[in-house]
Amino acid sequence: MDTKLTPEIILEKDFKTGIRGYNQDEVDQFLDDVIQDYNSFMQTIDTLQSENRRLIGELEDAPRRQVAPASTGTTNFDILKRLSNLEKHVFGSKLYE
């Protein structure tokens, strides 16, 4: 991210004064607030960029898994077998009489 201003540039900025110029104390207070915001934004950006680099590194280091899709027939058979065993356990032999 390219920015024209940094907290240091804002802090060191001098404004020319005229006959009917701005109140210098108000300008200084406003610039102090801007500097605080810049510092906060820059810290947040640094934190997010560090976290982004860490997460990208984790993704690159993670093993590439390619899971083969299970056969539908085998899966259905397993489910039906488990269901049959559950019925036998719950209802006993009365179900098959």
Image: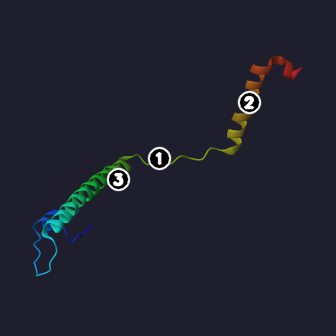
Query: What residue lies at 76% left-to-right and 28% top-to-bottom?
Result: 84
The front one of 29 and 2 is 29
How far from the left and from the top, in percent, is residue 74?
68, 39
Q: Which residue is mark 2?
A: 83
The front one of 20 and 57 is: 20
Q: Is residue 14 left or right of residue 97?
A: left
Image-quadrant location for residue 82: top right
* Mark drawn on residue 65: 1
The reply to whether discs 3 and 2 touch (Cβ–Cβ < 8 Å) is no
- The colour scheme used to paint the residues is rainbow
Query: Can you say whether 64 is above or below 3 in the image?
Result: above
Residue identified by numbered label 3: 56
Of badges 1 and 2, the one in the foreground is: 2
Task: Measure how far apart labels 3 and 2 are at the Cα level.
Answer: 43 Å
Circle 1: residue type: Arg
Q: Is residue 62 left or right of residue 67?
A: left
Local packing at callout 3 (Cα closer than 10 Å; few below 14, some 14-19, many 20+) is: few
